[in-house]
Image: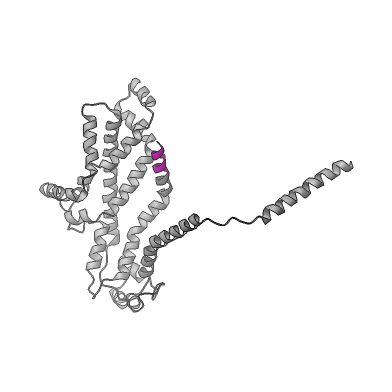
Amino acid sequence: MTATATAPSVRSDATATDRSTATKRPRRRPSVGKTLAWVYLTIVIVVTVFPFYWMLRSAFSNNYAMIAHPSSPWPVGFTIGPFLRVLGLEDPAEAAAQGGSGATVHILHYLVNSIVYASVSTVLIVFFSLIAAYAFARLQWRGRDLVFSCFLAALMVPGILTVLPNFVLIKELGLLNSFAGMILPGALFSAFNIFFLRQFMLGLSTETEEAALLDGAGRLRVLFQLTLPMTSGPITTLAILGFIGQWNDYFWPLLVTTDESVQPLTLGLAVFKQSSPQTQPDWAGLMAATIVAALPMLLLFMAFGKRIVNSIGFSGLK
């Protein structure tokens, strides 16, 4: 009985000793390389986030007070007037008192135009890229590799070289100042999207598709019922990145549109900046409009950012 009672106490004493020894062990000092890496990462984060912070600071400031204290790190004369001006909810007299212009940007109208432009463009680009990638990855036809090589060569052509021919084509078709004129030149062909999806499809197993073809399924049915679900990750990635690219597009809509009824939000911000009757632009209002324009993209990244990273990593492993 004595031995039995003593054994647990000895083990408990040994355990306590091990724990005390473990707690007294000195912590390892971080290596020089890890310290430099963290310093570099911190600098990159600060440089990246600071413009957004400064944009917020300016959007909540009074224009006159901001001119008097340009280096203040906090909002000067805190007010939500710039957001009210952008949304057309502020009286012109109140706007002038805050150093704002009497101009307003029809943010909701431009926002709808941007959504239509970016959404339709993204759907068409992804759809046609998917069909072309499937043809290059699964179908056997004469000259396939030669045509694909031409597609790859298109990746090396700067986009600025195609602007003038596309503009002349849209003008001759009578599609200026229309959504079709903005969307069609880039909707039917995207060399990078085709290359990206083709490379992913080449890594997929063909056994299920071959079995479906033997059972009498057509190519389109195989594509949309079998291949499409397996490529949902890369397609989502291309769709989100394409939507962001179209949302931020400025140069092409500037060339083909002069009518506010079809102009996207990027042009609306430029119109708002140039329509200020003051000696200088309404910077607070412009920053507020920029925040409103960037908010959908921030929400998109918050919702799908992890999926983008995972799908890119997965496609790289494939």
The residue sitting at the right extreme is: 1
**Boundaries of the magenta span:** 310-318
Residue 173, compared with residue 217, is above or below; it is below
Examine the rendering and report whether any part of residue 87 can be seen.
no
Q: Nearer the viewer, residue 185 or 142?
A: 142
The residue sitting at the left extreme is: 172
Tell me what residue is drawn at x 30 percent, y 25 percent. 218
Residue 89, compared with residue 179, is above or below; it is below
Colour style of the rendered protein structure: one colour
Quarter of the figure that contains the C terminus: top left
Residue 222, compared with residue 285, is above or below; it is above
Tell me where residue 48 sits by quadrant: bottom left
Quarter of the figure that contains the N terminus: top right
Q: Position of residue 17 (x, y in %)?
A: 74, 51
Q: Position of residue 212 (x, y in %)?
A: 36, 24
Tell me what residue is drawn at x 21 percent, y 55 percent. 251
Q: Position of residue 296 (x, y in %)?
A: 36, 55
